């Protein structure tokens, strides 16, 4: 009898968790970002002076206004007529995609529409680095290169994507310095495992990750 009760309890728990997972997935919708506030923030020289790497984060969520401006600074469209971005890429290949990992799930930044497209309703922040603070930071950027968009051999593709990611991550550093946010670029990542979790294609490669949040104590 006790064994039957245990089995029933386990079954009920699995049904409950399954129902919650379905509901969670159904709630994940595109996030329309706000227009960038280009008149605010510190001057470039002030941001350069304050730029630093930080590894202590508050769990406090970032508001939509900050997320919107952050992503635009990283690689948003600053010339609508041509679709060119705030960060350069080799031959304007725009091969770097920015994925955004948050507690509610994983999103892909659509720079053309300035929205976040949902990818999966799963919190994968713990997989964005081998350091524990990746789980504390409320938002983690994952820079992913699409090698199908780059000319040349594998060595050229790796080099170009690394350089282009560097431009974007520095934009993020300067934005965070301007807004009083903490951030650090991470290369110590299990990239192959993260790629599998994200269901990336064969031509896609995780280059770097970058946790962002309010400074921790």
Image (cartoon, helix red, strand yellow):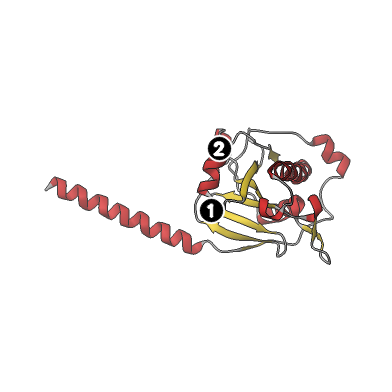
Residue 51's x, y, as percent?
A: 78, 36
In-front residue for pair 130/216: 130
Which image quarter is the C terminus in? top right
Residue positioned 31% across, 57% down in the render: 15
Residue 205's x, y, as percent?
A: 62, 46
N-terminal label among 1 and 2 = 1
Q: Is residue 180 above or below residue 75?
A: above
What label does residue 36 carry, if any?
Answer: none
Q: Secondary structure at mark 1?
A: strand
Q: Is residue 149 above or below residue 112?
A: above
Label 2: how many Cα within 10 Å (few below 14, some 14–19, many 20+): few
Q: Is residue 86 visible?
A: no
Residue positioned 11% across, 48% down in the render: 1
Q: Is residue 77 visible?
A: yes
Determine the CA span between mark 1 and mark 2: 19 Å
Single out the residue that lies furthest toward the left: 1
Residue 92's x, y, as percent?
A: 79, 55
Q: Is residue 216 above or below residue 115?
A: above
Q: Which residue is mark 1?
A: 105
> Which mark lies nearer to you, 1 or 2?
2
Residue positioned 34% across, 56% down in the render: 16
Q: Please state if 179 lies on the left or on the right of 63 as rendered.
A: right
In which quadrant of the rendered view does residue 189 lie? Answer: top right
What label does residue 190 carry, if any?
Answer: 2
Q: Secondary structure at mark 2?
A: loop
Q: Please state if 138 lies on the left or on the right of 68 as rendered.
A: left
């Amino acid at each position: 009898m006790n064994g039957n009760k245990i089995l029933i309890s386990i079954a009920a728990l699995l049904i409950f968790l399954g129902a919650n997972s379905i509901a969670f997935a159904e709630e994940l919708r595109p996030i329309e970002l706000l227009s960038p506030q280009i008149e605010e923030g510190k001057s470039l020289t002030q941001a350069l002076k304050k730029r630093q790497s930080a590894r202590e984060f508050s769990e406090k969520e970032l508001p939509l206004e900050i997320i919107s401006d952050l992503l635009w600074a990283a690689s948003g469209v600053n010339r609508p007529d041509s679709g060119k971005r705030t960060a350069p890429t080799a031959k304007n290949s725009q091969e770097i995609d920015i994925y955004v990992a948050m507690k509610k799930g994983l999103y892909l930044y659509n720079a053309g529409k300035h929205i976040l497209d949902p990818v999966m309703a799963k919190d994968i922040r713990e997989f964005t680095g081998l350091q524990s603070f990746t789980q504390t930071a409320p938002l983690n950027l994952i820079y992913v290169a699409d090698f199908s968009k780059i000319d040349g051999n594998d060595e050229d593709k790796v080099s170009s994507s690394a350089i282009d990611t560097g431009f974007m991550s520095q934009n993020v550093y300067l934005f965070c310095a301007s807004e009083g946010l903490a951030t650090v670029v991470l290369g110590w990542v299990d990239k192959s495992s993260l790629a599998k979790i994200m269901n990336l294609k064969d031509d896609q490669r995780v280059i770097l990750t970058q946790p962002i949040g309010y400074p921790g104590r």
